[in-house]
Amino acid sequence: MAVSDPSSLPALKEFVMRYSPAAFALSLAIALTASVSHGADREIDPRALALEEQGRALLAAGEVQAAVDDFEAALAIDPSHARLYLDLGDAARQQGLDGKAIHYYRVALDKDPGNLAAITGEGMALVEKGAVTRARQNLAQLQSLCGTNCMETKELASVIARGPQRTVLTAEASTPDEGVVQN
């Protein structure tokens, strides 16, 4: 099709109008695919990894606050490192801060919706908080993702079967100290 020929202009115009939306959609799909795969290959900062490992060792040794400090420092170095939110959730559960643990697990799930460890951790924290019905929803989600025989499903099922273990002390149930005088 020569542009100099005036009779070919309608054919050229029809060709462009017919195929340009498809070409645009294809180029958009390729651009999105390239950007998504580029983000998945991102490496985690080695300093954050070192702090994470140190924090895990401290958590295993029972030094929860020191572990939290290391996890938070690693998060400051590499905020996109989703596994750190799992570590912070585990540490919060060990401290009995189930609401905070649930928050961290949900942040991890926002970053990776299919993360089995985050679903399990959130479910365990929900059980400790007394929200067993919501924990059962997590169990159903785990069963649909990995089946009934995967480790995460079995672990959450056993925690749900055991039920909440922490007792909550209310203000009415506590006794005041000897030096406290009621007005």
Image (spheres, grey):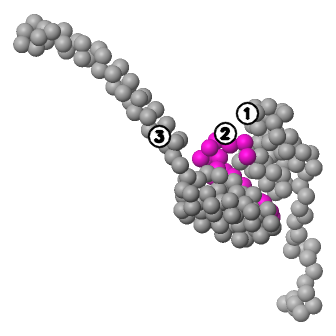
Helix, strand or loop at label 1? It is helix
Q: Was residue 97 drawn as part of the magenta stretch in this picture?
A: yes
Q: Which residue is mark 2?
A: 114
Instruction: Report how far apart the C-alphas of labels 2 and 1 lie in the structure.
Output: 8 Å
Helix, strand or loop: magenta stretch: helix
Left or right of residue 30: residue 3: left
Rendered-image quadrant of the C terminus = bottom right
Q: Earlier in the sequence, mark 2 or mark 1?
A: 2
Magenta-tinted stretch: 93-117
Q: Residues within 10 Å of mark 1 (few under 14, many from 20)?
A: some
Q: Earlier in the sequence, mark 3 or mark 1?
A: 3
Q: Which residue is mark 1?
A: 145
User: As rendered, which of 20 and 147 lies closer to the eye?
Assistant: 147
Mark 2 against mark 3, which lies toward the viewer? 3
Q: Residue at x 80, y 46 (%)?
A: 135
Q: Position of residue 133 (x, y in %)?
A: 82, 45
Q: Residue at x 89, y 55 (%)?
A: 164
User: As rendered, which of 65 and 20 lies closer to the eye?
Assistant: 65
Q: Position of residue 57 (x, y in %)?
A: 74, 63
Say if mark 2 contacts mark 1, CB within 8 Å: yes
Q: Quadrant of residue 15?
A: top left
